[in-house]
Image: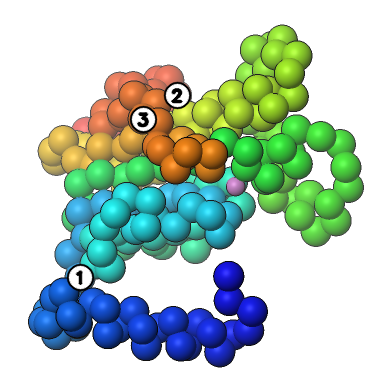
Amino acid sequence: MPETYKELLKGNQEWEKQVLEKMPDFFEKLSHGQSPNYLWIGCSDSRVPATQVTNTQPGSIFVQRNIANMVVSTDLNLLSVVYYAVKELKVKHIIVCGHYGCGGVAAAMGNKNYGFLNKWLRHIKDVYRLHQAELDAIEDETQRVNRFVEINVQEQVTNLAKVSFIQEEWEKGEFPYIHGWVYNLKDGLIKDLDLTVNSMKQLPKVYQIDYKK
Ligand code: CO
């Protein structure tokens, strides 16, 4: 692990050399523009970097990360990233990727005062309330956090499906597909929760926007 920030710069130079050895035109090609097929909404946790855990290169995934991979309907940062990904980059798949043992999710489950962070954790607590019966029934705390992680991913996939400009895209075609995944810190593997959404019909009626009127 780098001890000082200069190690990062040294690392960058080593990486550049390694990439050029394998792919001499890598930077030249990428410098002309990006056309990633995927948008990744993940946790800010340093252990879950999108490209590394999917064995992909720079240029393949557009990324937005925040604490506990949340899709908050008033988050202009996230919405701008999603808008650009969907409308300009025309990504085919959006992946919400949580991870077991997520500190943000665990914090939201408890009652400790996190100061300023209480405001962000509030959104995660709302998810707990919606699924309280199922979660309260899980006695083991680690298991409860991990199930909460899965449920939270599911809710954030649903929150994306509520976004009006995504529904607008579904009026025109099948894309984007929204997927829910959970990364396991203990073995480095991703679990696909198999809850792919690409139609507003998968949402409760109240969220479906009628574009014909
Ligand atoms: Co996390």
Q: Which residue is mark 2?
A: 206
Q: Report the side of 59 relative to 72 (left or right).
A: left
Q: Is residue 157 above or below residue 138?
A: below
Would you say the residues marked 3 and 1 are in contact, meaning their CB atoms lie under 8 Å apart? Answer: no
**Crowding near the residue tagged with mark 3, few <14, some 14–19, many ≥20 C-alpha atoms within 10 Å:** some
Q: Amino acid at mark 2?
A: Val
- How far apart are the two marked residues, 3 and 1, measured between alpha carbons? 26 Å
Residue under label 3: 192
Left or right: residue 77 versus residue 53 is: right
Label 2 environment density (alpha carbons within 10 Å; few <14, some 14–19, many ≥20)? few
Confirm if mark 1 falls within 8 A of ligand 1.
no
| 25 or 109: nearer the viewer | 25
Foreground mark, 2 or 3, reads 3
**What residue is pinned by disc 1?**
34
Q: Of the residues under marks 2 and 3, which one precedes in the sequence?
A: 3
Name which residue type carries label 3.
Answer: Asp
Residue shown at the point (34%, 24%) measured from the top left = 194
- The kind of residue on which mark 1 rests is Gln
Q: Could you say which quadrant of the image residue 106 lies in? A: top right
Q: Does 137 appear above or below 66?
A: above
Rendered location of residue 33, percent (x, y): 18, 76
Local secondary structure at mark 3: strand
